[in-house]
Image (cartoon, rainbow, N blue to C red):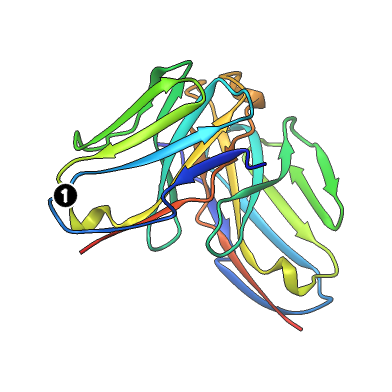
Amino acid sequence: DTAVSQTPKYLVTQMGNDKSIKCEQNLGHDTMYWYKQDSKKFLKIMFSYNNKELIINETVPNRFSPKSPDKAHLNLHINSLELGDSAVYFCASSQDLAFSYNEQFFGPGTRLTVL
Amino acid sequence: GQQLNQSPQSMFIQEGEDVSMNCTSSSIFNTWLWYKQDPGEGPVLLIALYKAGELTSNGRLTAQFGITRKDSFLNISASIPSDVGIYFCAGYGSGNTGKLIFGQGTTLQVKP
């Protein structure tokens, strides 16, 4: 029973294409996140949503658009893919926005390769 | 913005040895979390620390929240081959932004 799941696991595509990554959590959490992990393994938050409302948007290009149809899902759509978008993207979730007690649980990641 | 400096960057040790890694910051953090990432997987939470001075254990792992709230360490005792992976410290800083900040990671390799 996967708590936070992402699809696809691997995504290889050409520059200029548009692609989506899906995320679902079955933990009953209110808050979901997208992180980007670069080639040096550094993890950086991109977005967070609480009950389908955008909370954090960390200076991410407009080509990235998160969408939350309900609080159990947070999808990431990327337009006009660029070489620099190649990375591993992680979805995460946490109970709520009680910031001091906010353990985040991560999905398995989606490795995006842009050729 | 707030940053976490994690060290060492990598460690190569013999099975059975103890390991220590730490994170420091120039600013105060309210919560410290330690994660482990196995190859091809997402980070998995190991230990969460909520109060300054708190010392918490999880099996062979022990972590402490520094008194100054600007540092934390993680110790692994009697390492085994499955301890291999990348260990990340992470924390919530001041200002209640809800943004979890990660250290650069410590890559641990264990020689059987």
Query: How busy is the neighbourhood of tag 1: few (under 14 within 10 Å), some, or many (20 plus)?
Result: few
Kindly identify the residue that appears in the image at 19 percent across and 49 percent down: A81
B4 to A15, vertically: above or below: above
x, y percent for residue B54: 80, 37
Q: Is residue B66 visible?
A: no
Query: From the viewer's perspective, is A78 left or right of B106?
Result: left
Which image quadrant for residue A115?
bottom left
Query: Could you say which is closer to the camera, residue A30 or residue B67?
Result: A30
Which image quadrant for residue A28?
top right
Query: Could you say which is closer to the camera, residue A93 or residue B87?
Result: A93
Kindly identify the residue that appears in the image at 85 percent across and 58 percent down: B60
Q: Is residue A27 visible?
A: yes
- Numbered disc 1: secondary structure: loop
x, y percent for residue A72: 52, 25
Query: Could you say which is closer to the camera, residue A76 or residue A103?
Result: A76
Query: From the viewer's perspective, is A43 left or right of B25?
Result: left
**Three-letter amino acid code at disc 1?**
Asn
- Chain bearing tag 1 is A
Query: From the viewer's perspective, is B54 left or right of A114?
Result: right
Residue that protrudes farthest toward the front in the picture = A1
Kindly identify the residue that appears in the image at 46 percent across and 33 percent down: A33
x, y percent for residue B107: 58, 67
A83 to A75, vertically: above or below: below
Residue tagged 1: A17
x, y percent for residue B77: 84, 64
Query: Could you say which is closer to the camera, residue B88 or residue A6?
Result: A6
Query: From the viewer's perspective, is A30 left or right of A41?
Result: right
Q: Quadrant of the N terminus of chain B?
A: top left
Q: Quadrant of the C terminus of chain B?
A: bottom right
Kindly identify the residue that appears in the image at 61 percent across and 18 percent down: A98
